[in-house]
Image (cartoon, rainbow, N blue to C red):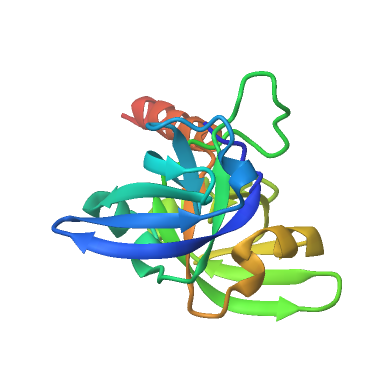
């Protein structure tokens, strides 16, 4: 589990295709790999990946990303030298500053509009229609692994309003119109909506 509080920006040091998966080498400050073990979970752009190897002194950690993950996320689009959001898994007793995030990406959203000024950034994201019932104004959502609050909801997506701190700590400040962003819906919202829909369907049936 994760909190959606991105700890730092890491860099894709290498990306190689091996049959039906890709191998990623991610470079990060060595302090972010303290007490890491092989098999540990790390969120890269919000995608829960398993560390297959690492070198703390060099600040590198390696992952294998299968095709199913590549189809649902933007990790297949990243290039060597590109920055990504990095979060270690939640430790017992630590503060949860965002919301509980599993690292299981449901889909990607397209950045349709981008407005920035000195104090605020508004993004308008377009989402596949099948996921829209779970998008609620002021509800939680994880975008590229960052825990955020939904702004206005539209027929085809929703708005985000990002503060300077979020733009600085995460890669969201580097995004451009047309980019694909990873989306993890709030599982509590999904469960409630699906339960209500099922009860209503049973009553109507």
In the displayed structure, would residue 150 be above or below residue 83? above
At x 46%, y 55%, the residue is 26
Q: Residue furthest left?
A: 19
Q: Is residue 47 visible?
A: yes
x%, y% of residue 73? 38, 57
Q: Position of residue 120 (x, y in %)?
A: 80, 69
Query: Does residue 39 lie above or below 137 as drawn?
Result: above
Above or below, 16 relative to 95: below
Quadrant hosting residue 12: bottom left
Residue occupying image coordinates x 43% and y 34%: 194
The image shows residue 47 at horizontal and vertical percentages of 44, 48
Task: Identify which residue, 117 or 171, lies in the foreground.
Answer: 171
Question: Is residue 4 visible to us here?
Answer: no
Percent x, y of residue 45: 50, 55
Q: How many marks?
A: 0
For residue 163, side relative to residue 96 (left or right): right
| Quarter assignment of residue 89 | top right
Along the viewing direction, whichever of 151 and 5 lies nearer the viewer: 5
Q: Residue furthest front?
A: 57
**Which residue occupies the extreme right position in the image?**
119
Question: In the current view of this chain or complex, which residue is farthest to the top?
Answer: 93
Give me the residue at 75% from left, 78% from top: 116
Q: Residue at x 44, y 63 (%)?
A: 13
Position of residue 57 relative to residue 38, above or below, is below
The quadrant the C terminus occupies is top left
């Amino acid at each position: 589990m994760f909190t959606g509080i991105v700890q730092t920006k890491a860099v894709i040091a290498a990306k190689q295709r091996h049959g039906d998966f890709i191998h990623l080498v991610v470079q990060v400050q060595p302090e972010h790999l303290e007490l890491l073990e092989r098999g540990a979970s790390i969120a890269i752009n919000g995608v829960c990946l398993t560390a297959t190897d690492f070198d703390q002194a060099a600040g590198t950690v390696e992952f294998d990303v299968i095709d199913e993950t590549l189809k649902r996320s933007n990790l297949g689009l990243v290039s060597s030298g590109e920055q990504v959001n990095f979060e270690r898994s939640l430790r017992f007793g630590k503060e949860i500053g965002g919301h509980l995030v599993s690292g299981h990406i449901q889909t990607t959203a397209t950045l349709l509009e981008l407005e920035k000024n000195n104090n605020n950034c508004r993004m308008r994201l377009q989402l596949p229609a099948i996921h829209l019932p779970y998008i609620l104004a002021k509800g939680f959502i994880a975008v590229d692994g960052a825990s955020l609050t939904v702004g206005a909801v539209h027929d085809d997506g929703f708005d985000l309003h990002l503060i300077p701190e979020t733009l600085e700590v995460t890669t969201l400040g580097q995004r451009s119109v047309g980019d694909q962003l990873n989306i993890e819906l709030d599982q509590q919202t999904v469960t409630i909506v699906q339960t209500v829909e099922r009860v209503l369907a049973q009553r109507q049936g």
